[in-house]
Amino acid sequence: MIMDFLERSATNDSDVATSWLYALFAANLYRFCPQIDTVSYPDIYRRLITSRYRASDDQLADVLPVKQEVLTSLTSYIQQIKDRPGIVATFHTGSYRLLSRVMYMQGLNVAVVMSREILAEQGEYLFAQHAKMEDVGGLQLIDADAGNCLLKMLVALRDGYHIVVYMDGNHGAAPTKDESDNEEVSFFHCNLVVRKGLAVLSHKRDIPIYPILSSLDEADDTFYKSYPTIFPRKEEPLEDYTTRVFRRLYDHLQEVISVKPEMWEGWLYVHTMPGKRERNNKRRRNQSYWPCRVGTRYYMMISPRYTCQEIGKLSFLCMRKWKRLTRQMKS
């Protein structure tokens, strides 16, 4: 994957804060959460990358790396939703890759919506891992990039499967040209544009939405937090329901990452979901500059416009030194 290559391009600690991926991370965090002091960015970034690798390691573990009390709590919730298949709405936080495994180990039939790239990369392993287990629920993987994605989701729901969807990922067919399938939602100090197809599906077919997010507790152990089910109301207009769904879900995401911003992988790609309108924010700085390099070429990432300008090596070194001195002075 491109992100994995960019991570590996930062070969040591001194390279981390000048990698291309770090520049995107910093520009995103600066734009959405200007209240976070930039001096903490390198540490947050390192913890984020560590969290990504941990999520991958957890997925490969033979023994489920989740405490029994966490499983007990989640089992209780799963029993409550078991008899009414719905959309399990989650995000790329914490050990998000374990969620579907935990669910089918509790007897639920689970269909996971994932991008075609991830499906090709992980699908065979996920099916093999599932096949080794006994007395578990079924597993399906649905290609989010396929034109019949929503149809497959409906079929899976009809067959008694819960649909696991990563709300900050791709979860539907190609967008329409007039952007009529988009919804704008407030997120920290900016807005995001998200695909509203799932909310439309939920409203039209009376499908409940079950929000569950993963994070870490104070001891750095994985836990899952479930939130109240979002039910469609017959008398509620579709537009109002769509707004309610995404406001509620992204409020849950904010709750998790306000405490631990490193829990969300979305800081690496949220620039692909910018909204057209931004909320007034007196704390916002006009713009910031993040030095980065790819191989032997040097660039300056300009936030919040996400423009990138190639610069000379001397300018790069001066800017990097200035960033370091600024962090040292603040700390």
Image (spheres, grey):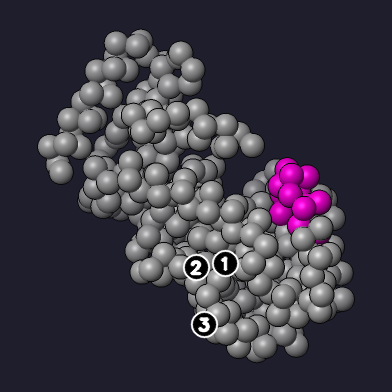
Q: Main secondary structure of the magenta part?
A: helix
Tag 1 residue: 65
**Dot placed on the residue nearer the N-terminal end, 1 or 2:** 1
Report the number of discs. 3
What amino acid type is highlighted by mark number 2?
Answer: Thr
Q: CA distance from mark 1 to mark 2?
A: 8 Å
Residue 321 vertical position relative to residue 193 in the rendered view, above or below: above
Q: Does residue 151 appear in the picture of this structure? A: no
Residues in magenta? 114-127
Is the residue marked by circle 1 packed among few (<14), some (14-19), or many (20+) residues within 10 Å? some
Q: Residue at x 47, y 45 (%)?
A: 49
Q: Secondary structure at mark 1?
A: loop
What amino acid type is highlighted by mark number 3?
Answer: Glu
154 lies left or right of 98: right
Marks 1 and 2 close (CB-CB < 8 Å): yes
What amino acid type is highlighted by mark number 1?
Answer: Pro
Residue 285 x, y percent position in the rendering: 25, 41
Residue 235 falls in which quadrant of the image?
A: bottom right
Residue 266 x, y percent position in the rendering: 50, 50
Residue 112 falls in which quadrant of the image?
A: bottom right
12 lies left or right of 284: right
From the viewer's side, name the closer residue of 302 and 49.
49
Residue 222, numbered circle:
2
Q: Does residue 320 appear in the picture of this structure? A: yes
Residue 52 vertical position relative to residue 152 in the rendered view, above or below: above
From the viewer's side, name the closer residue of 245 and 277.
245
- Front: mark 1 or 2: 1
Residue 235, numbered circle:
none
Q: CA distance from mark 2 to mark 3?
A: 11 Å
Residue 69, numbered circle:
3
Residue 167 falls in which quadrant of the image?
A: bottom right
From the viewer's side, name the closer residue of 211 and 287.
211
